[in-house]
Image: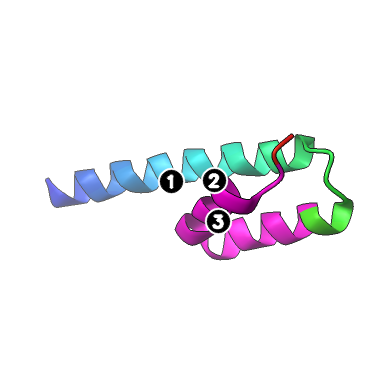
C-alpha cells in the first residue's frame, strides 16, 4: 500500500509541476525569469512549486 500512496503523491506532484511550468510559459514575465522558474521547478520539484506559488509571476 505504501508504494501506491507514494506513487500517487509523485504523480500529483508531477501534474502540479507541469501545470506550473505551463503557467510560467504563458506569463508575461521576461524570458530570463521564465527560464529561472522552469529550472527551479525542474531541479527542486516540491520546493520549486511552493516557491512559484508564493513568489512566481501573478499574471
The residue at the point 11 percent across, 45 percent down is: 1
Image mark for residue 2: none
**CA separation in Å, label 2 and label 3:** 12 Å
Query: How many residues crowd around disc 2 within 10 Å: few (fewer than 14), some, or many (20 or more)?
Result: many
Position in image of residue 26 (x %, y %):
77, 35
**CA separation in Å, label 1 and label 2:** 6 Å
Position in image of residue 58 (x %, y %):
69, 39
The residue at the point 15 percent across, 51 percent down is: 2
Classify residue 45 as left or right of residue 22: left
Position in image of residue 22 (x %, y %):
68, 37
Mark 2 and mark 1 in contact (Cβ < 8 Å)?
yes
Classify residue 14 as left or right of residue 38: left
> Which image quadrant is residue 19 in?
top right
Q: In the image, which is nearer the foreground, mark 1 or mark 3?
A: 3
Q: How many marks?
A: 3
The residue at the point 55 percent across, 46 percent down is: 53
Q: Provide the residue designation for mark 1.
A: 13
Tag 1's secondary structure? helix
Q: In the displayed image of the protein, which residue is found farthest to the bottom?
A: 43
Q: Quadrant of the C terminus?
A: top right
> Which image quadrant is residue 38 in?
bottom right
Is the stretch drawn in magenta largely helix, strand or loop?
helix
**In the image, is residue 35 above or below residue 7?**
below
Tag 3's secondary structure? helix
Image mark for residue 51: 3
**CA separation in Å, label 1 and label 3:** 14 Å
Question: Of callouts 2 and 3, which one flags the residue occurring earlier in the amino acid sequence?
Answer: 2
Classify residue 1 as left or right of residue 55: left
Q: Which residues are magenta?
A: 34-57
Mark 3 and mark 2 in contact (Cβ < 8 Å)?
no
- Residue 39 in magenta stretch: yes
Q: Provide the residue designation for mark 2.
A: 17
Amino acid at each position: 500500500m505504501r508504494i501506491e500512496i507514494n506513487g500517487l503523491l509523485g504523480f500529483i506532484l508531477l501534474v502540479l509541476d507541469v501545470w506550473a511550468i505551463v503557467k510560467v510559459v504563458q506569463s508575461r514575465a521576461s524570458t530570463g525569469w521564465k527560464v529561472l522558474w522552469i529550472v527551479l521547478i525542474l531541479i527542486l520539484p516540491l520546493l520549486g512549486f511552493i516557491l512559484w506559488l508564493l513568489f512566481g509571476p501573478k499574471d
